[in-house]
Image (cartoon, helix red, strand yellow):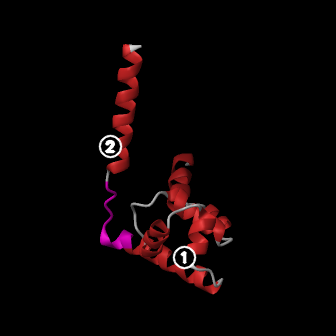
Amino acid sequence: MFVNTIRINTFVQNNEQMASKKQILSPKYHSILETLGENLKLARKRRNLTTIQVAERADIARSTLYEIEKGSPKVAMGAYFNVLKTLGLQNDFLKLASDDELGRKLQDIKLL
């Protein structure tokens, strides 16, 4: 029992450390997230949806939606996906890394 308690406490501490770790991006890559956030904001506005409506439908807080629309790296990928799903853009998620040009070239080199 005592050993299980220690394991559980260690697991919780490790998860808390991982959750509190700040994601640091270079300005170049942060601008990509900012563009994604802006695109999501424009998609929301084109559908005449308020931030309250999207947040409720995506099951996230309004402040999280605000962070997503700013392109914040601290928001979980699942929250980004829920917003995409709410806007009917969930299939765009499948396009991520689908055309792995560099990986295919590396694979072809190994085949030679």
Residue located beneath label 1 in the image: 51
**Looking at numbered disc 2 in the image, what kind of residue is underneath it?**
Gln
The residue positioned farthest toward the top in the image shown: 1
Above or below: residue 70 compared with residue 85: below
Query: On the image, which quarter does residue 10 sit in?
Result: top left
**In what element is the residue under mark 2?**
helix
Task: Tell me the distance, in whole angstroms, between the alpha carbons under discs 1 and 2.
Answer: 31 Å
**In what element is the residue under mark 1?**
helix
Residue 96 visible: no
Residue 28 visible: yes
Q: Mark on residue 86? A: none
Give the residues in magenta.
22-30
| Number of on-image labels | 2
Q: Earlier in the sequence, mark 1 or mark 2?
A: 2
The spot of residue 44 in percent (x, y) is 59, 79
- Mark 1 crowdedness (10 Å alpha carbons): few <14, some 14-19, many ≥20: some
- Which residue corresponds to the image point at 33% horizontal and 50% vertical from the top-left? 20
- Which residue corresponds to the image point at 46% horizontal and 77% vertical from the top-left? 35
- Which residue corresponds to the image point at 41% horizontal and 18% vertical from the top-left? 4
Q: In the image, 73: left or right of 62?
A: left
The spot of residue 8 in percent (x, y) is 40, 27
Q: Which one is in front, 3 or 32? A: 3
**Looking at numbered disc 1 in the image, what kind of residue is underneath it?**
Thr
Name the image quarter holding the N terminus.
top left
Q: In the image, 96: left or right of 70?
A: right
| Residue 37 in magenta stretch | no
- Which residue corresponds to the image point at 32% horizontal and 43% vertical from the top-left? 17
Q: In the image, 104: left or right of 85?
A: left
Q: Which one is in front, 104 or 47? A: 47
Q: Mark on residue 17? A: 2
The spot of residue 64 in percent (x, y) is 46, 66
Above or below: residue 47 compared with residue 101: below
